[in-house]
Image (cartoon, helix red, strand yellow):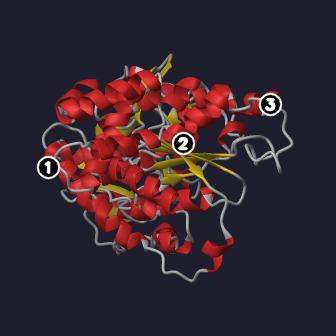
């Protein structure tokens, strides 16, 4: 008595279909699972035995062997419970093999036989549809997730008995896949640029950063609006494209967090981890590797408030992802690659008390200021495209009653600049100006003679690195896009260089005696 059931497993952000082969034969009673099963998969034996007993299926005193093929890929998670249980019932003749052919089965079993939701349904369902599978039977709590894959019928059931009855051809009542409302979208809509009084220079820097997806560092005294502005940056970013939405939704599905959205994510993620976060939580990993915070921020914003309070070694983890746009985690079970193309936004005070260089209020010694600023390493600082200072709020700005621009108005300009970038980078795989490499900068950021001489003087005066030079050109290209200019002018370069002056002011002169 032999049966084969199709299931799936996730590796990194990719998935593979797994064939669950079940054989029941005469011999000493046993139940074993082979094929590199993890501890959760091995524990399926006890869950399946008790669940089948409680729904009226008694296992004969025979030798039950389960093989998960291909056997050289590690299997983790609880999604193999339902395939193993249905495979046993098929081998016992309670379900016909033809009924399960071409059907993808996923789900965790409770001891009563109920089916519980599992992680990673979306990438597995997409892989199944790509390989020609047109039906998926899974827990009712995951049915809406598989339904997002248009070429596959998603059938959610409540327990293993319903799953067996459905596969046997019986008529059962199956609720239509439903999704919870996206509460995150309502929270994002409540945040608007019009709620920020004054700070026009800060808003302009945020607009440029959003238009080109540039990394942004905001330095300023406490209460100057740094965090308030950073939280509103997603409100002016362009929505996710269909391709980006699938990428982001896949990562959230693997982490078991897609249910909070209720559908494919269309709003760019915004992650704001506490400064006590560990390196593993930030980059990902663990015994069973999972995406970290920087992967959850893929195609969105990673906001690090109080930047110097993060451990320096934790911040330095960002250096490679900021360049390569991905995180690679090596384990004995294999190498896992997670996407990490995010917009880094940092906010910080210029000194421990927060009021440097205002010596009337700052009581920090030059040594304390230097030590505080140096918690942010040079390589991280060099990767910030825009560094802007948040000036203290003036009383006139707080009480002027002037109508501030809304996020919708700013987003219109950002979207117009985004369309120019789409046209420029069509077919190249580049999404924003910030994604350009050194070769792309030479191709798309061509300077005229006047602009070239200007940058030559600035390169020497400001002692720019090659990376800083390229980042200035990329920011200038974005400013030109916002101005609907085909070429980069000296005025665009000057504004881009101004966005590098704050870091020059604090890190090159910070803490000097006055």
Q: Position of residue 227 (x, y in %)?
A: 61, 57
Q: Crowding at label 3, few (<14), some or many (≥20) Cα neighbours within 10 Å?
A: some
Instruction: Indicate the position of residue 228 as horizontal and vertical percent values.
Output: 60, 62
The residue lying toward the viewer, choosing from 78 and 60, is 78
Q: Quadrant of the N terminus?
A: top left
Tell me the CA gap for discs 3 and 2.
Answer: 35 Å
Neighbor class of circle 2 (other Cα within 10 Å; few <14, some 14-19, many 20+) is: many
In terms of secondary structure, where does tag 1 sit?
A: helix
**Could you tell whether 33 is left or right of 486 in the image?**
right
Q: CA distance from mark 1 to mark 2?
A: 31 Å
Q: Is residue 195 left or right of residue 209?
A: right
Instruction: Find disc 1 in the rendering and name its residue.
Output: 423
**131 or 397: nearer the eye?**
397
Q: Residues within 10 Å of mark 1 (few under 14, many from 20)?
A: few
The residue wearing badge 2 is 293
Q: Is residue 309 visible?
A: yes
């Amino acid at each position: 008595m032999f049966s084969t059931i199709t299931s799936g497993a996730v590796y990194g952000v990719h998935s593979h279909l797994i064939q669950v082969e079940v054989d029941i034969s005469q011999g000493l009673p046993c139940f074993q699972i082979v094929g590199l099963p993890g501890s959760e998969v091995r524990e399926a034996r006890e869950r399946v035995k008790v669940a089948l007993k409680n729904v009226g299926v008694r296992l004969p005193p025979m030798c039950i062997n389960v093989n998960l093929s291909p056997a050289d890929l590690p299997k983790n998670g609880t999604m193999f419970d339902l395939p193993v249980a249905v495979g046993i019932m098929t081998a016992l003749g309670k379900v016909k093999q033809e009924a399960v052919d071409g059907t993808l089965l996923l789900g965790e079993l409770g001891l009563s036989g109920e089916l519980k939701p599992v992680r990673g349904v979306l990438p597995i369902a997409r892989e199944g549809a790509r390989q020609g599978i047109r039906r998926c039977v899974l827990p009712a709590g995951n049915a809406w997730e598989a339904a997002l894959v248009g070429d596959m019928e998603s059938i959610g059931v409540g327990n293993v008995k319903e799953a067996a009855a459905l596969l046997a051809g019986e008529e059962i009542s199956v609720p239509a896949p439903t999704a919870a409302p996206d509460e995150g979208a309502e929270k994002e809509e409540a945040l608007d640029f019009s709620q920020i009084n004054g700070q026009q220079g800060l808003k302009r820097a945020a607009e440029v950063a959003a238009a080109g997806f540039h990394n942004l560092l905001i330095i300023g005294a406490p209460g100057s609006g740094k965090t308030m502005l950073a939280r509103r940056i997603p409100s002016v970013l362009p929505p996710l494209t269909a391709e980006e939405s699938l990428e982001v939704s896949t990562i959230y599905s693997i982490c078991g967090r897609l249910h909070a959205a209720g559908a494919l994510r269309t709003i760019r993620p915004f992650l704001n981890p506490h400064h006590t976060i560990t390196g593993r939580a930030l980059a990902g990993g663990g015994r069973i590797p999972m995406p970290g915070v920087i992967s959850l921020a893929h195609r969105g914003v990673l906001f690090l408030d109080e930047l110097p309070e993060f451990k320096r070694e934790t911040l330095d983890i960002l250096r490679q992802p900021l360049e390569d746009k991905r995180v690679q985690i090596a384990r004995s079970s294999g190498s896992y690659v997670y996407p990490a193309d995010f917009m880094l936004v940092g906010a910080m005070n210029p000194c421990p008390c927060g009021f440097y260089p205002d010596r009337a209020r700052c009581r920090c010694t030059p040594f304390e200021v230097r030590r505080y600023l140096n918690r942010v390493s040079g390589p991280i600082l060099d990767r910030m495209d825009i560094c802007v200072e948040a000036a203290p709020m003036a009383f006139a700005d707080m009480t002027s009653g002037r109508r501030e621009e809304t996020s919708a108005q700013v987003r219109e300009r950002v979207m117009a600049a985004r369309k120019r970038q789409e046209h420029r980078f069509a077919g190249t795989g580049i999404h924003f100006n910030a994604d350009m490499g050194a070769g792309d900068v030479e191709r798309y950021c061509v300077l005229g003679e006047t602009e070239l001489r200007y940058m030559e003087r600035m390169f020497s005066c400001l002692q720019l690195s090659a990376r800083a030079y390229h980042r200035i050109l990329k920011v200038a290209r974005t400013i030109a896009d916002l101005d609907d200019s085909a070429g980069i002018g000296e005025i665009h370069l000057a504004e881009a260089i101004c966005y590098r002056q704050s870091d020059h002011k604090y890190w090159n002169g910070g803490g000097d005696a006055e």
